């Protein structure tokens, strides 16, 4: 029994220590996103640009959304703290990271200007997910990224801080490595 426990613990340590390798060049792609806001748990979807520069260990997401009564622009930056391989022969891997977000938004109503407001949010994210690289230059990924931070809402010449700002985010995307 002691040998079994020792082998199991050793296997777990080795599995966590087997780091997956992203290519060292530029990564650029597109991400489909859906976020459930902590404030009211309403959802909003959209798309983002996925970017990874070879000089920095940060995976960036840049998004902008425009609707009939709103505008939203934001940026996320995540560093993968732990990466591991699930199936080595498929280059099917997992990761958990730590990052941050910043966003700007504006909601406007042409019929009732009292409902117009602008806001900003800033906070931390903890993305965790999986990716597969079917070819050496194509990465398909999926993650959940809960975020938590502080927001400021500007309405009728008043500034109102609010907490929690952030969401439970779901991302699925493809990144091409150059």
Image (cartoon, helix red, strand yellow):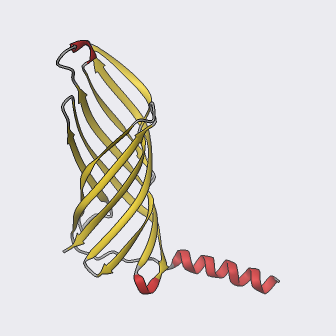
Which residue is at the far right?
Answer: 1
- The quarter of the rendered structure image containing the C terminus is bottom left
Whether residue 97 is visible here, answered yes or no, is no
Percent from the top left, x then y, of residue 163?
45, 29
**Whether residue 94 is situated above or below residue 137 in the rendered picture:** above
Residue shown at the point (21%, 70%) measured from the top left? 26
- The quarter of the rendered structure image containing the N terminus is bottom right
**Whether residue 64 is situated above or below residue 171 in the rendered picture:** above
Residue shown at the point (44%, 31%) measured from the top left? 39
**Whether residue 134 is situated above or below residue 140 in the rendered picture:** below
**Quarter holding residue 69:** top left
Whether residue 8 is visible here, answered yes or no, is yes
Percent from the top left, x then y, of residue 20?
42, 77
Residue shown at the point (30%, 55%) measured from the top left? 32
**Quarter holding residue 112:** top left
As rendered, which of 60 and 144 lies closer to the eye?
144
Percent from the top left, x then y, of residue 115?
27, 17
Image label count: 0
Residue shown at the point (43%, 87%) measured from the top left? 89
Percent from the top left, x then y, of residue 92?
43, 77
């Amino acid at each position: 029994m002691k040998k079994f426990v020792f082998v199991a613990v050793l296997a777990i340590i080795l599995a966590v220590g087997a780091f997956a390798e992203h290519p060292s060049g530029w990564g650029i792609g597109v991400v489909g996103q859906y976020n459930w806001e902590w404030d009211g748990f309403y959802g909003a979807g959209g798309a983002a640009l996925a970017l990874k520069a070879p000089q920095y260990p940060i995976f960036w997401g840049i998004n902008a959304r425009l609707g009939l009564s709103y505008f939203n622009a934001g940026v996320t930056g995540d560093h993968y703290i732990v990466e591991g391989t699930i199936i080595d022969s498929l280059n099917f891997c997992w990761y958990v990271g730590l990052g941050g977000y910043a966003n700007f938004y504006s909601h406007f109503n042409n019929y009732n200007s009292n409902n117009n407001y602008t806001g900003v949010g800033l906070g931390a994210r903890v993305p965790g997910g999986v990716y597969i690289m079917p070819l050496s230059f194509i990465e398909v990924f999926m993650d959940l990224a809960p975020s938590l931070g502080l927001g400021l809402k500007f309405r009728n010449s008043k500034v109102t801080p609010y907490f929690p700002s952030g969401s439970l985010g779901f991302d699925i995307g493809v990144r091409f490595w150059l």
